[in-house]
Image (cartoon, helix red, strand yellow):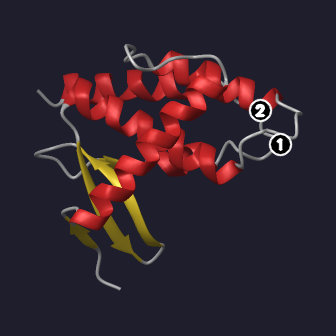
Amino acid sequence: MERKVDELLPEAKNWISRCLTLGLETCEFYGTSMKNSQRPSDLDIVFKKWKLDTSPEKIAPNGIINGLGILFGELMIEQFRLEWRIVTDDFGTEFALIFPGTSREIYPRDFVAKRIDPDNNEFGFFEAMQNLIKDELSRNK
């Protein structure tokens, strides 16, 4: 299959908006307000609280993947002027953040999904990814 990178259509923008709301609600549920914050380290706190949550009210994994993944993406767009795109390739179709003027991209939902497994105790990855993006952008100036 030929790889395609597409602009977001209105329905994709609406989906991102709904996921952003879900992400903000998830943060509130776990006691961290993101309304005035632009710190991925707060998302790291929320993710860790979610992983340790044993209550019946625990948010479903897809809610974490979509909510926190998209919320992180929006934070990176605000901070670094990245852009959402839809990438389709041999692996499927996914939302990606594109580094303008380069062929570089990241997949925020995927890097959350990789850490959902109960046996994976990796924390601090939102802040680490922010630092990687910052380093990458400073090298490409």
Q: Quadrant of residue 137?
A: top left
Question: Which numbered dot is residue 28?
Answer: none
Count neighbours of disc 2 (C-alpha within 10 A) and say few if under 14, some if 14 to 19, many if 20 or more.
many
Q: Amino acid at mark 1?
A: Pro
Measuring from the top left, give residue 111's x and y in whole percent.
54, 44
Q: Considering depth in this image, is 127 or 1 the residue closer to the camera?
A: 127
In terms of sequence position, does the residue under pointer 2 or pointer 1 come before the other?
2
The nearer-to-camera label among 2 and 1 is: 2
Measuring from the top left, give residue 84's x and y in whole percent.
26, 50
**Which quadrant holds the C terminus?**
top left
Pointer 2: what residue?
51
Badge 2 vs badge 1, beta-carbon distance below 8 Å: yes
Q: Considering depth in this image, is 106 or 103 the residue closer to the camera?
A: 106
**Left or right side of 60 for 22:** left
Task: Report the label total.
Answer: 2
Pointer 1: what residue?
118
Q: Quadrant of residue 74?
A: top left
Residue at 78% across, 39% down: 58
